[in-house]
Image: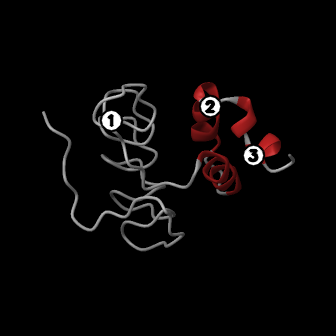
Amino acid sequence: MSKPEIPNLRTWPRNLSKSQYGGLSTSQYGGLSTSQYGGLSTSQYGGLSTSPGGGMSTSSSNSYKSNILPWPYFVRELEKRGYDWASVMIRQYLPEFLWPENFFNQ
């Protein structure tokens, strides 16, 4: 299966838009979306997916382009919005120097 092409999908450099595909959008494809392809999705191609094409994948092929903020900003935003479950999951894989409390206090 090849990686889907999503028309008009915005990738980093990030926008903080709440529009349909924006980094802070909760609609499908958005940075705060848990639906397929969303920034908080664990399904294939999702931001929290560890499978090839996913945001947490360590695969060197099929490079992932994210529609979410850089990790320190994204984790901070998740916590501000009460998405603690997602923050905890991300922190399990994220190096500690990228945790907001370490990154922004350097």
Q: Which mark is residue 100?
A: 3
Furthest residue in direction front, as rendered: 60
Q: Amino acid at mark 1?
A: Ser
Q: Residue at x 38, y 50 (%)?
A: 38
Closer to viewer: mark 3 or mark 1: 3
Choose between 40 and 101: the one closer to the eye.
Answer: 101
Q: Is residue 64 above or below residue 82?
A: above
Give the mark nearer the N terminus: 2 vs 1.
1
Q: Pointer 1: residues within 10 angstroms few (<14), some, or many (20+)?
A: some
Please name the residue shown 12% across and 33% down the image: 1
Q: Earlier in the sequence, mark 3 or mark 1?
A: 1
Q: Position of residue 27 (x, y in %)?
A: 38, 62
In the picture, the disc for residue 32 is: none
User: Which residue is at a point 80% across and 50% down the rendered structure image?
Assistant: 104
User: Relative to 58, is 76 above or below?
Assistant: below
Of residues 71 and 86, the one nearer the viewer is: 71
The percent position of residue 53, horizontal first and vertical second, equals 31, 36
Identify the residue shown where x is 70% and y is 39%: 98
Tell me the number on the disc at residue 94.
2
Q: Which residue is mark 1?
A: 43
Instruction: Locate residue 49 relative to residue 74 in the image: left or right.
Output: left
Image position of 83 with respect to 44: above or below: below
